[in-house]
Each structure stands twice: as structure tokens, then as C-alpha cells.
Amino acid sequence: MEYSHLNYLINDVVLLGLQVEKRERISLLIKNDKVCVINDMKFFHEENTFNFNEVILNDQDFAFLDFIHKNHSKKEFVLVKNCNYLKLIYFFTNEKYLNNTFLDKHGRIVQGSIIEKYVKYLEIPIVDILIRSFFLKLNIKIQNRFTITLTCDFDILNFWSGISKKNTLKLFLNQLRKNQFSLFINQLTSFLFSSILPKYNYYLSKNMYFFKEYNSESIEVKNIAFLLIDDTNKKHDFKNNFNRPILKYLTDLRNQGVELALHPSYDSSGNDKLIKKQILKFTQLFDKTDKVRYHYLKVDYQKDLRILEHNNICFDYSFAFADSLLYRGGITKRFKIWNNVDNKPFDVKIVPLTIMDGTLFDYLGYERDSDFLDVSKKLELSFEHGFEITTLIHNNGMTKMATKKDISFKLNSLIINFVKKKLKLHDAN
Ligand SMILES: [Zn+2]
């Protein structure tokens, strides 16, 4: 273990995105196979050095993780013990829990990619708990506001551009056959005028954002729109036409405080040319962006962060298991990943995704209201132990023309109510 490793863990993982008191008083030391972190010349943490390429957890590490897993929900759960904080934080954030052979049909890391014995630790934001405990031991006070980022992936901007002429005709004939005249008129109007007047384009919802002006000392709410601007894959990308009504809608969003960012197309992972092309197009349409979220969360970090770095992207929002509510990396907070080839951290900051609508309908088969208890549980758990919550609702789920049984709609109102509740509760204290 070298100083570059220790510096990375402290500055780019533990402290990244956090404001702490007198940060300059924290000093780092490696000596005789020990690594030491000292705060204010008084408080210190010491642990054995470990191999960055091959981290092996010992019995003591497992005992500590089990202790957290068992006790984290107890009231007044405080944890200051001698454990290998840095090793464990590195192990989880850099995903040493994966068996690197299993990827899903889209080539993504999913729940099935995790070595079974580590799955249970990802049920909780274990790294955030470790960080808080580490700070407690070092007497470091966190001064941050909790960040809630509401995001939407605009895969498709108009319902009618995702349906063939033949199917459109079928849809209308069906409505007529069933005597659904008002529905027919409604949708026919949308079909005829949606590309001219935004109010007839039912995919241009704004309901997944939180615009209300408020002043909270403890919570910060941000809004981001990730836009799919190129179709490079016939099966998985939609062709979006950025015509005047759509540009007007997006400009309105931006004026209301929604940041516009890039949603790289399905084949963009590992493809520098495609990323370059889309960034150029995005810049011509809007302005520069320094944020991406990959379509389908299809990303291979050791390859793609290098590409993003070269293209001046500073933040990636794709870090999650698409098929599961487990905490990927065991963390809610932004951090950097270690570049195994160049032996240094990647410049791009990873912002973990806490929850997305697609997980619920495509993988977990949500139907009843009671299914959403797990979502509420995850939001509360993240709020209690973590530092950030980032959510994803697709715009096409937020309309009466949605095909996925109201799941996005229900999840969205759950999230918005959560935000409102926390803003109110917190500021009442
Ligand atoms: Zn997408």
C-alpha cells in the first residue's frame, strides 16, 4: 500500500462531497505495515496495510460487518470500534465482492454478479455507516446538507415516435371498435398536434421534479434531466426529434432549475467515438454538460471512466444494480473508483442511484401498494445512515399513456411525499 492509495481512500472516497470541520488538520501516515490517520494531532485511527489488487477479508472483518448488519437498525446505534475501516470501504466501493464472470444479457453487473456471501451486506448502506463511525472515532464533524437528486431519463420524448404507423392505426381502430370515443378523440388530437403543441405531447411531464422554492438548512434538492439524443441501436434506442416544442419544454425545465445532461445511447459503453459524437450534438442543442447516465445503466467502469475523463465528463449517475434494491458499492454518497491499469483514481465522480422505476416493474414485478414498503424502507435507511439519495423516474411512465401499470406514477408520488416530509420534519427541529 502506497501513499497514493491512502490519499485516494481518504480524499476521493471517504471525504469526497462532504464538508468537514478543519479538514486540513487531518494527516496520513504509513509506517511498518501500518496505516494511520490522525485528526488534530489528537485523534487517530490505525490499521494494517493491505494489498490494493487483492483484498481479502479476514474473520475479524466479517465479524464487524455482521455486527453492523445485525445492529444498524437499533435506536442510538453508535459504532466506534477498532476495525479495518479503510480496507472495508475500499473492498465495497471498488466492488471486490463481485465474481467477475457473471453479466446479464445487456452486459451489466447485476445482483447475480455478487458473490453470495456478500449480498446481505449490500442490503444496507454499509460504507456510509463505516464512514460515519470512522469520523466519530477521529472526532471529525460532518457539516453537509443531505442531498436529494430527482432525475428523469428521457428515453423517448413523444409517444407517437415510438409506435409504428401500422400500430397507431390498430390502436385507433381498437378504440373505435370498443366505442371509446373520448379516448379516441383525445389520442387522435395528441397524434395530430403533439409535434406542434407541447400540451398535446403527454410525454412532456414535469411531475417527477420538485420545483417548490424552499430554504432548508439540512436538505438540498436537485433536479436533473438525462436526454437520449442519439439512436445507435435499433432495438434499444428511440429516435428523438428535438423540434421546437420539445426544445421549448426543455428550456422551460432548465429555467425552472432542472439541469440538462446526457443519456448516452445503448451502444455507447466502450465507444469513445459515439460518446464524442453525442457530447458534440448535446452541446450544439443545449450547452456543455459534465454529467452522464448510461441508457439501461449499461456501463463498464474500468473502460468507460477512461473515455468519460477524455471527454471532460465529471459525474456519472449510472451506479446501481438495475435488477435489485441492493446498495451497489454499499454506498449512497458520491466517490471515485480506482483505475486498476494506471494505478490512480479516475477523475470522474460516481453518484450512486438509490432507486429507479424500471427496477420495480421490469425485475421485481411490483403490482400491489404493499410492494412499495421495501422502497420506503430503502429511502428511510439511506436518509438515516447515508449522505445522498438519487432517484430515477422515466417521463414515459408519468402519463396516462404509460404502459407499465402506474408503477412510475406510484413510485414518484412516494418519492415526492418523502421529500416533502423530510423537508418539513427536518426544518421543524
Ligand atoms: Zn434510458
Image: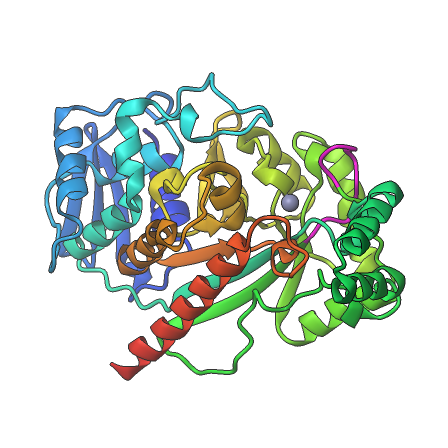
**Residue name at image x 53 percent, y 60 percent:** 409
Q: Is residue 154 left or right of residue 22?
A: right
**Residue name at image x 42 percent, y 38 percent:** 324
- Total number of numbered discs in the rendering: 0
Q: Is residue 232 magenta?
A: yes
**Residue 55 shows in the view:** no
* Residue 82 vertical position relative to residue 136 in the rendered view, above or below: above
Q: Is residue 105 magenta?
A: no
Where are the magenta residues, as a range? 227-237
Q: Residue furthest top?
A: 101
User: Where in the figure is residue 257, as x and y percent of width and height?
Assistant: 62, 73
Q: Which one is nearer the viewer's eye here, 169 or 134?
A: 169
Q: Is residue 218 left or right of residue 161?
A: left
**Residue name at image x 52 percent, y 82 percent:** 213
**Residue 176 shows in the view:** yes
Q: Quadrant of the C terminus?
A: bottom left
Q: Which one is nearer the viewer's eye here, 135 or 93?
A: 93
**Residue name at image x 82 percent, y 66 percent:** 185
User: Where in the figure is residue 327, as x and y percent of width and height?
Assistant: 37, 42
Coloring scheme used: rainbow
Q: Quadrant of ligand 1?
A: top right
User: Where in the figure is residue 152, as x and y percent of width and height?
Assistant: 60, 57
* Residue 414 vertical position relative to residue 210 in the rendered view, above or below: above
Q: Which one is nearer the viewer's eye here, 287 or 41?
A: 287
Q: Quadrant of the N terminus?
A: top left
**Magenta segment, principal secondary structure?**
loop
User: Where in the figure is residue 299, as x and y percent of width and height?
Assistant: 58, 34
Q: Which one is nearer the viewer's eye here, 140 or 128?
A: 128
